[in-house]
Amino acid sequence: MKILVTNEDGIFSAGVMALSELLTHFGEVTVICPQNDDYIDNVKPSLNRPLRLKRVEYPDGINAFTINGSPSDCVKLGIEEITDGFPDFVFSGINLGANVGRDAFKSPSTRAVEEAYLHDIPAAAIAIDECRACNINFSKIKESIYELLSSLMAGHLPSRSAFNINIPNDVKANIRGTKVLPMDADASKYRFKKLVSLDSEIFYFLEDANSLPSNKRSDLFYIQQNYITISPIVVRNTCESELEDYRSWFAGITGG
């Protein structure tokens, strides 16, 4: 099995190194990541500049490369140019900070999974509910997700299978189970906090609201209850079932 791995935290982040090492148990791993964790570079695809590919030394003899682009750039380049034929599975992770609720729709790691989806390749974004790598024991996290990865690798999934997976920062014995449910577009983990400087400049900072939504089908709720959350992702190129309604709605509009 050929496996392509990227992430949004940089080529030498502890999360991607832990995940790629774990995935060597299931097949041949190629890692392609952004050269850093610059948020601007990691959100938008690189349309107006060339991508510079550089090979880097990686543990366990894993083929690893870095580019000056986004995770979705990494996946597209990896699928179309770097891997010897299409990979069998694409992973983005392990990324710092859970991608839950409406926040997941803006995540560079889920964008990477969507790129794989558009190439008909099964994919999963994996994030951990902790934003500081120094607070994570990745050896224990690998134990927590080994069974999950085994199921994904052996599941004979349809080509367009994509998942957003979030894991608690805890040992396997303390994780209460898994929940398969949609990403809750009504819930957000982060809120803006307003600060006014001494010279009256206004600043807004995103901070973790750390509040539990009442919706018991919320992925945000269950990750905070120490469950692994799994949310299937569907990328639709058009709303086919609603096309006739929209055609009627726009019928009176004439072109110039």
Image: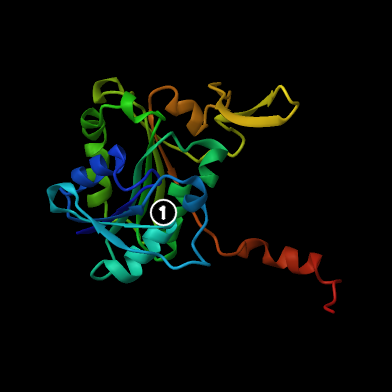
Q: Amino acid at mark 1?
A: Pro
Horizontal side of residue 247 vs 42, given as left or right: right
Q: Left or right? Give the position of 174 relative to 75.
A: left
38 is higher (above) or lower (below) than 122: above
Residue 26, how many percent across, how many down? 17, 50
| Outermost residue toward the bottom in this view | 256
Label count reads 1
User: What residue did someone put label 1 on?
Assistant: 71
Helix, strand or loop under label 1: helix
Query: With respect to residue 172, does 234 lie above or below?
Result: below
Classify residue 114 by image quadrant: bottom left
Which quadrant of the view contains residue 164? top left
- One can see residue 184 in this view: no
Q: As drawn, which residue projects farthest toward the front?
A: 199
- Residue in the image at 49% along x and 36% along y: 100
Percent coordinates x, y for residue 157 in the rendering: 31, 55
Residue for point 47% across, 51% down: 42
Please say if 113 is above or below 93.
below
Task: Specify how the rendered protein is coloured.
Answer: rainbow
